[in-house]
Image (cartoon, helix red, strand yellow):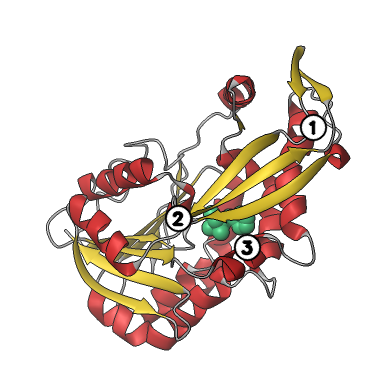
Amino acid sequence: MNMAVSPVSDKADQGEFLRDVIAGLRQPQKTLPCKYLYDEAGSRIFEKICELEDYYLTRTEAQIFSDNLEEIAASIGPGAVVIEPGAGNCEKVEPLLEALERPQAYIPIDISPEILLAARGRIQARLPQLEVEAHVADFSQPGAWRGAGCKYTGRRVIFFPGSTIGNFDPGQAQQLLEDFASQLGQGDGLLIGTDLVKDAVVLERAYNDSEHITAEFNKNLLVRINNELEGNFDPQMFAHRAFYHPLRQRVEMHLVSLKAQRVRISGEEFGFSEGETIHTENSHKYSLQGFASMLDSAGFKSRCNWVDGKELYALHYAEI
Ligand code: AVJ
C-alpha cells in the first residue's frame, strides 16, 4: 500500500483563528465559524454525541448503509476510486470499501495528519490490496485537493457522509457541490448523506441531548479560545441553546450570555448583554426533492437515494 501525506503548515492557522474570532465577535449578531468546534477535544466530544440515544443521525446513516450495502456498491460499480473530503478517522468508509467490487484506491482528505496516519494502519490491515493516498488539506477551500488521486483510472466517487453538507449555508453548499463536480469527469459519482426535514421536537432533542454532551461540545469553543487565543471566557456564564428554524430549515446552535459581561481575547475586549448570543453552528435539513434539485443545479444527475424506515435521514448517489 502506498500513502502520500502532503503536509501543510499549521503555523498560519493560529493567526487565521484569531482573525476569524475577532471578526465574528465584532458583528451585531456575534458568530463563530463552526469549523473551530472540531479541534481534538471537540472531535472527541462529537464522537460521544454520535453515540447518544437522542442523536439519531450517525446511527441512522450506518443503518441505511448496512441495509442497502449491496445496492449501493452495485450503483457505484467495480474498480472505483473513492475520495473522502474531511475523512476524519476514516471509519464510515470501511463497510463501503469492503462491499465495493475491487475498489482501486481510497483517497482520504483531512486537515489532521495525525488522524490520517492513525487511520492508515487500520485500513491497511483490513484491505491490503487497496491503494491509499492521503492528503492533508482543508476540503472546504475550493480546489484545495485538485488533482488528488489523478493517477488512478477508475470511476471517481466522492464520499461525503455524516450530513456534513448541513454545516454549510445553502449558497456555500451549492458552491461546494459545484466544486465537487468540477473535480469529477463524465460518469464519476457522489455519494452523500443528508439529514431530512422533520418534526422540530425530534430535531431539537438531537441537539439538546439529555446528557448535555452537545452543551459541552458547544462550550468547548470558548475553552479553546481561552487556551489558544488568551481569552478569559467563563464558560459557566454561557448556556447552550439549540433550536429548529423552520423557514431556514436548519438547527441553529448558540451560546447565550447569562449576564452582562465583558470578555478579553488577545487584548481586545468584547461586551455581552444578558441574553445576547454567539451563533456557533447551523445544521441544515433537506427534503429529498430539495436536495435533488441542488444536486441538479450543481451539474449532477440524481441516480438513487436510500432512506431509513422512519424517514429521518437520506443517502444520495448522483453522477456527472
Ligand atoms: C457534524 C455537522 C453533521 O450538524 O448534526 C452535532 C454537528 N452539532 N451536534 C450536525 C453537530 C451538534 C453535526 N455535523
Residue 70 pos. (x, y %): 33, 86
Where residue 51 sits, quadrant-wise, is: bottom right
The answer to whether residue 131 is seen in the rendering is yes
Residue 164 pos. (x, y %): 47, 55
Three-letter amino acid code of the residue under disc 1:
Glu
Position of 119 relative to 94 (above/below): above
Q: Which residue is mark 1?
A: 274
Residue found at x 46% / y 77%: 95
Position of 111 relative to 288 (above/below): above
How far apart in space, not on screen, are marks 2 and 3 (Cα)?
Answer: 12 Å
Residue 182 pos. (x, y %): 21, 45
Q: Secondary structure at mark 1?
A: loop
Q: Return the disc, 1 or 3, that comes first in the chain's sequence.
A: 3
Q: Is residue 125 left or right of residue 300?
A: right
Q: Return the disc, 2 or 1, that comes first in the chain's sequence.
A: 2
Q: Which residue is mark 3?
A: 204
Residue found at x 23% / y 50%: 181
Ligand 1 rendered quadrant: bottom right
- Which marked residue is nearer to the observer: mark 2 or mark 1? 1
Where residue 31 sits, quadrant-wise, is: top right
Residue 75 pos. (x, y %): 24, 77
Three-letter amino acid code of the residue under disc 3:
Glu
Q: Which residue is mark 2?
A: 249
How far apart in space, not on screen, are marks 2 and 1 (Cα)?
Answer: 27 Å
- Which marked residue is nearer to the observer: mark 1 or mark 3? 1
Q: Residue furthest top?
A: 267
Q: Secondary structure at mark 3?
A: helix
Position of 22 relative to 45 (above/below): above
Dot 2 crowding, Cα within 10 Å, few <14, some 14–19, many 20+ = some
Ligand 1 near label 3 (Cβ, under 8 Å)? Answer: no
Residue found at x 25% / y 49%: 150
